[in-house]
Image (spheres, helix red, strand yellow):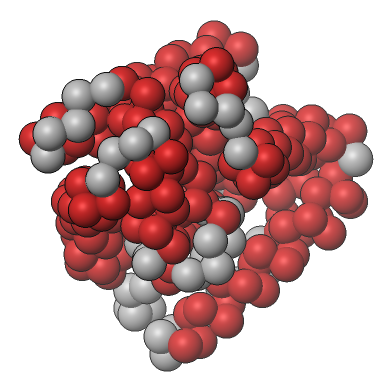
Amino acid sequence: FVNTIAPSLNLAGTTLVVDDARRRGIAPGKATSAALLMQITVDSGFATIMLIAFGILAATVGLSPLWFLLGLLVIALVSAMVLILVLGRKRPALVLRALRPIERLVDRVLVRFKKKPLDPWVERIVGSFSDAAGPKTTAKAFGCSIAASACELACFSLVGVAFGVHQPEPLICGYVVATLFAMISITPQGVGVVEAAVVVAFTSFGESSAAGLSIALVYRGIVFWMPFLIGAILIQTTKTFKHDA
């Protein structure tokens, strides 16, 4: 929900996780490591499917330079978060400078919703950044993220089949384009932009624009609007958004 109302390459919600964990007595550094690891595995799982889809595009209708650049942005984002985890152990001062802009962004969102800004926490992450998960836990999280992205792809494909699209290439690439534009668009989760991008992707494979728009609207209703409404309710249970006793 926070990632939706504050477009930030899906990083704004990480700050909320860290602050809520801190208020529950969890060390900020440990919570930051966990939140970054979560986002790294989510984006890495999607990137794995994205690279497969780009290979299909390159072998069929050709890979658009725009989509290639957007894919590089995802790779750069994952690399940056991995770098933050590594620097958290080696150069903590650099991590503080990297996280403070994110903290200020979320503070502005909280003020807009008439909530108190977050208590400063970035300085306290240095002492407990060594609590990052080990390789075995990381591998399990990565496997779960690939499975989750595969489920999203299956959802998109089943919606496509329901609207009469049975070719795997437009379904796979349509899912990748929808997720990419949801991540990098300046509008909340790419509202309006994602739908247009999916239509362009489908027409490039010879499918009708009507089918592409219908698939995009139904898919987004399942993976965006329904979680958005649930998140708007559940965010009130976090200690960050609760009134102090």
- Tell me where residue 179 appears, x and y as whole percent: 43, 44
- Tell me where residue 122 appears, x and y as whole percent: 71, 59
Residue 75 appearing in the image = yes
The front one of 94 and 156 is 156
Relative to 231, is 84 above or below?
above
- Tell me where residue 82 appears, x and y as whole percent: 71, 32
Relative to 211, is 193 above or below?
below
The front one of 146 and 160 is 160
**Quarter occupied by residue 88:** top right
Where the N terminus falls, by quadrant? Answer: bottom left
Q: Residue at x 48, y 79 (%)?
A: 110
Relative to 219, is 6 above or below?
below
Residue 29 appearing in the image = no
The front one of 50 and 164 is 164
**Quarter occupied by residue 184:** bottom right
The front one of 75 and 101 is 75
Relative to 199, is 79 above or below?
above
Total numbered labels placed on residues in the image: 0
- Tell me where residue 241 appears, x and y as whole percent: 37, 73
Q: Residue at x 50, y 20 (%)?
A: 60
Where the C terminus falls, by quadrant? Answer: bottom left
Return the residue found at the far left.
162
Q: Is residue 54 left or right of residue 79?
A: left
